[in-house]
Amino acid sequence: MSQLVEPAPAATGPASDVLLAEPADAPTLFRKGRRWWATIAGYVATVFALVTFNFGIPRLMPGDPIEALTAFGSPTYVLDDTTRASLNEYYDLDAPLVRQYGDYLSGLLRGDLGVSIYNNRPVSTDLGGRVGWSLLLIGTGTVISVLIGIPLGVQSGWRRGKRVDRGLLAFFLAYQNLPIFVLGSAAFVVLTVKLGLFPYGGGSHPFNDYTGLAKLLDVGRHLALPATMLGLDAATYQYLVMRSSVVGELGSDYLLGGRAKGLRERRLKYAYAGRNALLPVVSVIGLQFSLAVTSVVFIEQIFAYPGLGSYMLQSVAVRDYPAMQGAFLILTLTVVTVNLVVDLLYRRLDPRTVA
């Protein structure tokens, strides 16, 4: 009877070893289907398109940097039209768009993001002090989402229809349907303002002389709440996809064969069903990292975190073209680069997806 239910030649290991393994004579990743250079060429074309949109979109917005800089009520209000015209000429905003676009591209090739019109500092200097904070927040949030979404998705799918599955499913569905800025604001009011469990904002305490472990703990305490909110937001999709994938594996022959061999439930759950259901989650993790770039704008604003998101909102408010272009460029490059890495990784994990 055991021969009827025993999985194909890989009863000694997870079914994914069979499903994901390439034949011995199969060509490598970069020789089969779409060539690796086609993927890279697509990436380069996407980057060029994003750079072009990055230049054009700020200029399609109503208003302009000089108008915002010299408007009535602004600390830098200027009534003299001659001064305004001089500012336009100084920042080259009166030049034809084609020339501005050419200067923008040549500056990018030199690694020059321009000078902020609002604060007159190099944009690369402003961004250099903020990119690390945003990457720390997004990276920590992604790790938290993986640690929450994948194990709970496996547990819920394995116990489909049981009390633990119903409870987890209800929680994540409810969390998914609430906007991140509502949840973040509620968490800030309750946990920070009312209970005083977390700092009010920033990436660390200002004017401190912390070093070593004390500095690490200080940064971690400021990071904990915004990263957790970001991680829970991303974990909802990972949980749902992982649960669905595990449910689809429950009736597989290799699980029946594993039970017939007397394997422990923990090994069947994680090493067999969980590992074999993991492939779709790889794409979801990459997508969630990209969506986190959007969510981080709200999170940084709510928790006054000193990253790219808050800088971008400030630059939009004053129509600071160089600052907007710099912030948008960093965020979009992060998204497309992560998508490229996920695409190549997925092709390596499952060669069947290579067209």
Image: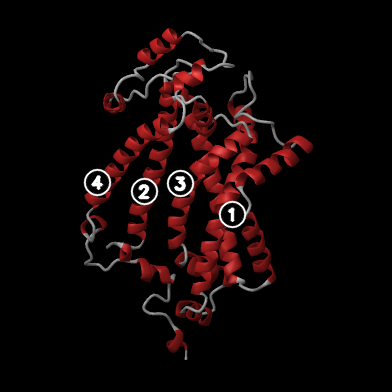
**Amino acid beneath label 4:** Ala
Residue 102 in the image: x percent, y percent? 26, 26
Measured as percent of width and height from the top left, residue 150 is found at 54, 58
How far across and down, in percent of the image, does residue 95 sit?
31, 20
Q: Are marks 2 and 3 in contact (CB under 8 Å)?
A: no
Is any part of residue 32 visible from this angle? yes
Disc 1 on helix, strand or loop? helix
- Amino acid type, residue under disc 1 in the picture: Ile
**Secondary element at tag 3:** helix
Dot 3 surroundings within 10 Å: few (below 14), some, or many (20 or more)? many
| Dot 2 or dot 3, earlier in sequence | 3
**Residue under the point 43% across and 74% down:** 12
Residue that mark 4 sits on: 41
Q: Are marks 4 and 1 in contact (CB under 8 Å)?
A: no
Q: Report how far apart the C-alphas of labels 2 and 1 lie in the structure.
A: 23 Å
Quarter where residue 141 is shown: top right
Q: Is residue 80 left or right of residue 353?
A: right
* Position of residue 55 measured from the top left corner of the image (x, y, whole percent): 36, 32
Q: Are marks 2 and 1 in contact (CB under 8 Å)?
A: no
| Disc on the earlier residue, 3 or 1 | 1
Question: Which residue lies under the disc numbered 1?
Answer: 148
Which numbered marker is on residue 290? 3
Going from N to C along the chain, the mark reached first, 2 or 4, is: 4
Residue ID for mark 2: 341
- From the viewer's side, name the closer residue of 192 and 351: 192
Vertically, is 78 above or below 242?
above
